[in-house]
Image (spheres, rainbow, N blue to C red):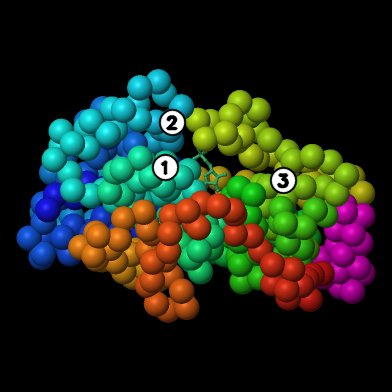
Amino acid sequence: MKIGILTGGGDCPGINAVVRGAVRTAIQKGYKVIGLRDGWKGLVNKDHVNLDLSSVAGILIKGGTILGTSRTNPYKIEGAVEKCKKNFKRLDLDALIAIGGEDTLGVANKLNKEGLNVVGVPKTIDNDLSATDFTFGFDTSVNIVTEAIDRIQTTAESHHRILVVEVMGRHAGWITLYAGIAGAADVILIPEFPFDINEVVDILKKSRKSGKKHGIVAVAEGATFKDRSMVIQKEELDSFGHVRLGGIGGILSGKIEEMTGFETRLVVLGHLQRGGSPTAADRVLGTRFGVGAVELIENKKFGRMVSLNGNNIVDVPLEKAVGKLKTVSEELYNTAKIFFG
Ligand code: F6P
């Protein structure tokens, strides 16, 4: 048995745990493993590297991905899908593990339907993939953002300022919500619930009146004002049709200062939220997913993805994972709102 592994889309802490988990499980079963470099680009260009025990030694604690990544979409490049199919054969692969978010797994799903033996592993800091309770990378990101908010709290308090913290997560508010609750933010704004600036200003004013002279507003990059469209950094779409989000924090902090008269500053956390060593929880989840992916292959369960259900690793059709985004529920947001102000 020969297995290929690739990692596509935005990198995320815990990917190397999956690669290590899969390689070590596969080798114990007597299988050969290769890594395809830079996501689907590696399969299109037959760019690969052998993976053995020494290749995965010491990588558990490392962030990023030892295989490299890209947002290459073979379905958007002429002849690339055919190349994927040919190279799968030329490399003598029996199966492929695709580690990625909705885009990478969307391609995995299509290629599987075209006859390639592919299984998926859900990966994203955004935690927005359906059919799994959590993705690895999310916990690390939440911890990074929480630590940032903790640090911001002390300087905001000293200067009696409002600090707006812009957080990643695309069209889902998971990271902002979790880190906002954990960091005791005064207001949490997420894409699922467009906000009214007057309400935000009211909360901050009331809070100041009651004696608290500083405030933290955690805003997701995909959050929107009730009466405006999404704020984007770059209109141009990537190969999966995504715009680059970002900029809401700047507009919001300007408005808050103008409408409250309180000195306001902005922190955009950016790619800090995706870098560095994974938390213990993400190392464990990534490891379990890596082992689970090889077991899927062993059982010939192609076209499926490993998934976390409660505390169990189960498998679901890839189709189910890429169908629609998993977003924050009203119930969860209402819990956060209790602590506003
Ligand atoms: O999907 C992960 C993510 O970090 C999003 O939260 C963010 O919007 C996007 O990727 C940023 O992408 P890039 O790394 O291409 O700037």
Overall secondary structure of the magenta section: helix
Residue 209 forms part of the magenta stretch: yes
Mark earlier in primary sequence (3, 2) = 2
Label annotation for residue 18: none
Residue 123 visible in the picture: yes
Residue 123 in the image: state x and y as whole percent: 43, 55
Q: Which residues are magenta?
A: 196-213
> Label 2 near label 1: C-beta < 8 Å?
yes
Residue position for label 1: 110
Q: Amino acid at mark 3?
A: Gly
Residue 90 in the image: state x and y as whole percent: 15, 33
Compared with 9, 165 (above or below) is: below
- Whole-Å distance between the Cαs marked 1 and 2? 9 Å
Mark earlier in primary sequence (1, 3) = 1
In this rendered view, identify the residue nearer to me: 24 or 231.
24
Label annotation for residue 249: 3
Residue position for label 2: 75
Q: Amino acid at mark 1?
A: Lys
Q: Quadrant of the C terminus?
A: bottom right
Mark earlier in primary sequence (1, 2) = 2
Q: Residue at x 79, y 76 (%)?
A: 338
Residue 63 visible in the picture: no
Helix, strand or loop at mark 1: helix
